[in-house]
Image (spheres, rainbow, N blue to C red):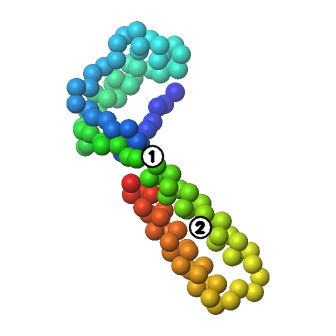
Amino acid sequence: MWVYTRHDEQVMPWTTENAKDCEPAFQETLRSVFGIDTRKAGEWRREHAVVERPAHPGRRAADQYDLIFKIAGLNKMIDAIEDSKGRSQDLEARLALMRTRRHELVQALQSK
């Protein structure tokens, strides 16, 4: 089993300060219950010990969900307009504005 996380996108704050290996009993639980090869993970950590960012302040999950729901709402409106027949120039202009706004929100979500 491979465990992967995007540390810079975590909602909870974290720091590598005072980081230490877990207790042998917990390592055995990780191995037996989840199939995690802690020896191999330890080797990887030693080989890739460079830490670009020793801490992360966390993110507000509410901010991320707010962006996601705004994007979803715009997607619904865009789909409804695209499905309509005989769109006016005014509607085409609104559609272009919505697509631009959606792009801005996606960029904001990806940069957080």
Q: Can see residue 51?
A: no
**Residue extending furthest toward the left:** 17
- Mark number displayed over residue 61: 1
Foreground: 3 or 82? 82
- Please tell me which residue is depicted at 55% across the width and 62% down the height of the picture: 71
Q: As shown in the figure, which amino acid type bears the numbered disc 2?
A: Leu
Q: Residues within 10 Å of mark 2 (few under 14, many from 20)?
A: some
Could you tell me residue 23's position as x and y percent?
Answer: 35, 12
Q: Is residue 98 above or below residue 39?
A: below
Q: Is residue 27 above or below residue 72?
A: above
Count of numbered circles on the image: 2
Label 1: element kind: helix
Q: Is residue 5 above or below residue 28?
A: below
Could you tell me residue 107's position as x and y percent?
Answer: 44, 63
Report the side of 13 relative to 2 (left or right).
left
Q: Which image quadrant: the C terminus? A: bottom left
- Please tell me which residue is depicted at 39% across the width and 23% down the height of the picture: 40
Label 2: element kind: helix
- Mark number displayed over residue 74: 2
Q: As shown in the figure, which amino acid type bears the numbered disc 1?
A: Ala
State yes or no: discs 2 and 1 in contact (Cβ < 8 Å).
no
Q: CA distance from mark 2 to mark 1?
A: 20 Å
**Residue extending furthest toward the bottom:** 89
